[in-house]
Image (cartoon, grey):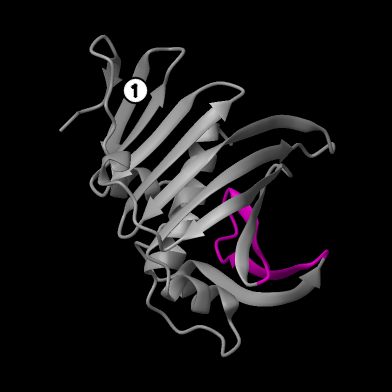
Amino acid sequence: MSMKSLVYLFCSALLLAACASQRVFADDLVGDYFSALDTFQSQFIQTVIDSDGQQVQRSEGMVWILKPGRFRWDYQTPYRQLIVADGKQLWTYDEDLEQATVKPVDEALSSTPAMLLSGFRPLSDVMTWQQTGSENGERWFSLDPKQADSAVEKVRIGFTDEQLSIIEVTDSFGNHTRIQFSQIKRNEALDQGLFKLELPPDTDIIGNSP
């Protein structure tokens, strides 16, 4: 699974939870948390462990989310990458390559594996969602895809003190991706300019820019 696919997946996961209007379990912290969520800002660490148990990737950065349909993932290490959705278009900018790709956000987030959590279909149509208990101080919920051929085998969301702290994904190749959030600010005002990507004039743009 590419970094772009992973980022689309995690953006979709948060946007789905923030925007979904669906029946949830009576004691569903996920539903309670995200139904009241308007904005989300956090530092994050993303790690990828392969099927042999070896860490193959570690990235750090910042994320901002504003519903509906806007987000900014700023990957700062090991190299700079920006992924920005303005509600209509999704931009991916690689600073080292001086290259950006753009596509309609619904097209990008409805592709596998992101379609599982995109919110374009009710979550109950594509996933089963349930609380799985507590572990290492976190309260965990699982999101399991109904599609047998899905690239995503399992998604887990962890909360610490009723605050979102971890999203984990296991793909069909046995790779395990974990995003851990810290320094979270919830429902604070965000600068609208965060969701507009300003590119250097010599940037090579792939796709149909608006």
Is 53 in front, or is 189? 189
Q: Is residue 167 visible?
A: yes
In the displayed structure, 206 sits above or below 57; it is above
**Most extreme residue toward the bottom, as rendered?**
26
Verify whether residue 14 appears in magenta: no
Quadrant of the image occupied by residue 48: top right
Q: Amino acid at mark 1?
A: Ala
In the displayed structure, 145 sits above or below 97; it is below
**Most extreme residue toward the top, as rendered?**
202
Q: Measured from the top left, where is residue 139 in percent x and y?
A: 72, 71
Is 162 in front, or is 103? 162
Quarter of the image with the C terminus in it: top left
Quarter of the image with the N terminus in it: top right
Q: Measured from the top left, where is residue 162 in percent x and y?
A: 63, 72
Q: Measured from the top left, where is residue 44 in percent x and y?
A: 60, 44
Left or right of 148 in this view: 18: left
Left or right of 143 in this view: 160: right
**Most extreme residue toward the left, as rendered?**
210
Q: Residue at x 47, y 26 (%)?
A: 81
Is 68 in front, or is 49? 68
Left or right of 138 in this view: 187: left
Is 195 in front, or is 156? 195
Q: Residue at x 34, y 56 (%)?
A: 189
Q: Residue at x 65, y 68 (%)?
A: 142
Question: Would you call the spot at circle 1 few (<14 residues within 10 Å), some (14-19), or many (20 or more)?
Answer: some
Please name the predominant secondary structure of the magenta segment in the image: strand
Image: magenta residue range: 136-161
Verify whether residue 143 appears in magenta: yes
Q: How many numbered callouts?
A: 1
Q: Residue at x 46, y 50 (%)?
A: 11
Q: Which residue is mark 1?
A: 100
